[in-house]
Amino acid sequence: MKKALQLQSISTWLPTASKPVIISGPCSAETEDQMIATAKQIAATGKVHALRAGIWKPRTRPGQYEGAGEEGLKWLIQAKKETKLPVTTEVANAAHVEACLKAGVDILWVGARTTVNPFSVQEIADALKGVDIPVMVKNPVNPDLELWIGALERLNKAGITKLAAIHRGFSAFEKGPFRNAPMWDMGIELKTRIPELDIICDPSHIAGNRELIALISQKALDLDMVGLMIESHINPDAAWSDAKQQVTPAALSKIIDGLVVRTPSSDNKTFKDTLSILREQIDQLDDEIMQKLSQRMKISEKIGQYKKENNVTILQVNRWEEIVETRINLGKAMGLNPEFTNELLKLIHHESIQVQTKIMNKVEERV
Ligand SMILES: C=C(O[C@@H]1C=C(C(=O)O)C=C[C@H]1O)C(=O)O
């Protein structure tokens, strides 16, 4: 077993009176006026705990706005002075880290396009050795959990314990309704692997448009994520980067008000009793499902043996097609989602073929 990360909960470095943690601000710091005006309006909502702004922007194509650079850092620090909110920005190399530390940035984040590159992450970690500053790590652009965990480990090894992960979605070849596919399973898997790690969701980058932000934010909270990083701008349509996904401070306030914050557990006795009764039912059913699956695989084994004796192939496409069709219809009639049934059947078929392959190719022991 790998050693777990040494972590300090976000509640120790970004304490909030109420959950969830909200980090907001413009995608990019564009001008001093835009930065300060946005920051003031956000702070006035009283619902935001930290201010964000991109200073160095990694853009997909050259010729797009690449951030204000160190000049922008001054505006961010000015915004901090005027709002009393801690500030955070993205760092992609050691020079960025040094500039931020010198300027007095409170929290750093590593962007998705940097998390993919262990060299860059290591450079940032080395620049942070001996520094006590919180760092948030966005998921890599590709859905690679090991790379995400690896980046957190590199920073942790450098002594950074105030760590959080940011789920901002993943690049996908097929364009769905989102700019970056949420692939919620990745967040669930990360939480399962490192339960003490706080995860913040970045609905702005998942959505790519402001209409979906509320929906994604709610989903993130229901998956036990502790905070949201939402991009906001005094005049979103005129933003120099990511205009479509930014919201006004007023819209941000509305989104936050609309969130239903649920707790991971409840002390209510009736709730606990009812949940445990229902969970017992699930335990019982899972037991039955496992027994049935085991019985099914034993029959596959027998079929494999019989096919071997008769020189018949393992894969029987017609039989399989018939199974898929009948089971999907059966599932539909029982209220099961056809996609779910299809995926489940694929897994079962895969295993059934494995089981038969083992039998088919077993080398008989010579006496
Ligand atoms: C078990 C068999 O072999 C394969 C596995 C199947 C299954 O697990 O249901 C169905 C068809 C075959 O591709 C079979 O031929 O019936």
Image (cartoon, rainbow, N blue to C red):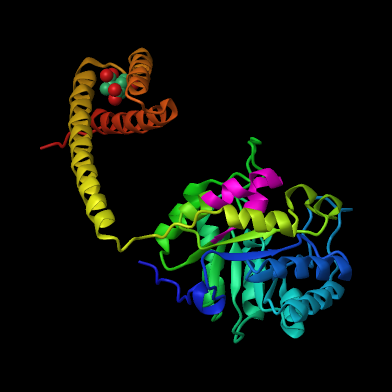
Q: Residue furthest left?
A: 367
- Quarter containing ligand 1? top left
Rendered image quadrant of residue 273:
bottom left
Q: Position of residue 342 (x, y in %)?
A: 40, 27
Please state, as top left, top right, bottom left or bottom right, where the N terminus lies in the image. Answer: bottom left
Provide the residue span drawn in magenta: 200-218
Please say if 22 is above or below 170.
below
Residue 16 appearing in the image: yes
* Residue 209: in magenta span: yes
Q: Residue drawn 76% across and 69% down?
A: 39
Residue 202 seen anywhere in this rendered image of the structure? no
Q: Residue furthest bottom?
A: 130
Residue 340: x percent and y percent?
41, 31
Q: Quadrant of residue 35?
A: bottom right
Residue drawn at the location 39% of the way across and 68% of the way down:
2
Residue 26 within the segment the image draws in magenta: no
Count of labels in the image: 0
What is the chief secondary structure element of the magenta stretch?
A: helix
x and y percentages locating residue 256 in the rendered image: 60, 57
- The residue located at (37%, 22%) in the rendering is 332
Give whichever of 40, 278 is nearer the camera: 40
Q: Which x, y percent locates residue 207?
A: 65, 46
> Quick check: 107 left or right of 21?
right
